[in-house]
Image (tube, rainbow, N blue to C red):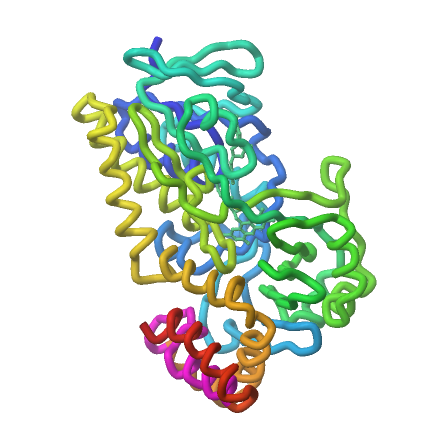
Amino acid sequence: MIHDIIIVGGGPAGATCAKHVATNKEIDVVLLEKGNIDRYKPCGGGVMFRNEKDFGSLPAEVIDADVDTFTMGSFSKIATIEFSKAGIDYGKLVYRDRFDKYLLEEAQKEGATLRTNSEVISAKRAKDHVELELKDKSRLKTRCLVIATGANNTRLQRQLNIDRPVDIVNTVQAEFELPENVIKERFGGGSWELYFDTAHIAKHGYAWIFAKKSGLTVGYLDKMVSVDKFKEIIKGHPIIKEKLKDSKIKEIEGKKYWAHPIADRIVEYTFDDRILLIGEAAGFIDRFTYEGIWHARKSGQLAAETLLKAHKKQDYSIQILRGYENKWIKNLYDCEDRSIYFSRMDHHFYYHSGFLDEFVDAIITVLQEKQLIEDLLEQGRKEGREDILFIEALQLKIVDELQKKHDKKTFSRMFKEFRRRVLL
Ligand SMILES: Cc1cc2nc3c(=O)[nH]c(=O)nc-3n(C[C@H](O)[C@H](O)[C@H](O)COP(=O)(O)OP(=O)(O)OC[C@H]3O[C@@H](n4cnc5c(N)ncnc54)[C@H](O)[C@@H]3O)c2cc1C
């Protein structure tokens, strides 16, 4: 038997793709996941507002907390924006076991066949299908293979000689216990906190605390990371140390510290004959924040649209599947809201300009201006615009701040970088 479509990888990309393909009840779609339905995946669990805008509200049991506040910090100072108080829904905080389980169940409800504990260990092409071998030695055939295996496992891509994310950043993360009332008092509710500091945290990344109801998700990312460095950050950074005071690391599956890569660039080709790449297996990611859940879901949905067309024509050739590329260029790369193209600008601005600490310092100083932020929040709320950090008035204030603090020559170098990003 040859299945119409097999999707390998049951993260947000694979589950969303399966759900959308399964809307056509004639298509036989199988989703293979190597873990359990509720496996742990190291992730901050920040499901930002664009998710619910595109994919609808999450059920209450999947949400651990709202993103009530956003904090940006350096080594010695912080600024906090209170979204919930201003009536802005910035997003939700989840744990990936519950969130991914929900997405997988949604795919099943639509009619996709889910097989958990089904690791695919090899893939090879045949004339009119792709053949997969599973760890339990069983074999499956498919007319079209969708690879949704994330950034951690690129074996199938290597075997099939197709692109895989080669540029990556790395992370270390741990889950901390802290009583709900202490979290509420210390963080003001659900909180998304990012700390930048080239000397003590990372030159190409940041440390985060996601304060949820049931605990704190804490980690850091950089080109190269280590558990020792992570321990130094949580014990040595004056602000982070205080935020984690009296907390205890939880053990998950016998492990305290989890390392995981994140893709850092879109692959060259996301399609081939009878093959599509989605989610982080294709390198879709915000290259500043490294947010990828929305990108994974969106690419899964766009791939499904192409697959529905291919099925109708009974043609899974490269000529039809390349339609997927046009879709993601329009809806992920060049779209209006937080496009990957824009995040690429941020990436260079923060991580490659050589001024990360200076920029962060200026941004925090501006974010500390209470009245300005209240006005921006009000403007954002009225315009239905959550990303107030990108409103031009704020950006211009940051430029003023840089000009005030730095000599003419340094400022002119900074301004060049800033202009590339904001004033295009
Ligand atoms: C530490 C960390 C923090 C992050 N925080 C956030 C955040 O707060 N918000 C956000 O939006 N993004 C965040 N991201 C990014 C986000 O987790 C990913 O971009 C997103 O999960 C990608 O989804 P995906 O479906 O492409 O891949 P994944 O979520 O990685 O899912 C891939 C799935 O494929 C399965 N699999 C792999 N190989 C095989 C195989 N051979 N056979 C069968 N199954 C296989 C895996 O078990 C896994 O379930 C974070 C990432 C990391 C590492």
Q: Nearer the viewer, residue 66 or 120?
A: 120
Relative to 220, 231 lies left or right: right
Residue in view at x 77 percent, y 71 percent:
238
Q: Nearer the viewer, residue 303 or 392?
A: 392
* Res 358 visible: yes
Whether 344 is drawn above or below 242: the answer is above
Q: Nearer the viewer, residue 22 or 285?
A: 285
Residue 135: x percent and y percent? 57, 16
Residue in view at x 30 percent, y 42 percent:
302
Q: Please, what is the dominant secondary structure of the magenta stretch?
A: helix
Residue 260: x percent and y percent? 62, 42
Residue in view at x 68 percent, y 62 percent:
201
Q: Is residue 347 magenta?
A: no
User: What residue occupies the far front of the structure in this picture?
Assistant: 409
Relative to 227, 20 lies left or right: left
Residue 300: x percent and y percent? 37, 39
Relative to 34, 393 lies left or right: left
Q: Which residues are magenta?
A: 382-403
Q: Quadrant of the N terminus?
A: top left
Label total for image = 0
* Res 374 visible: no
Whether 330 is drawn above or below 378: the answer is above
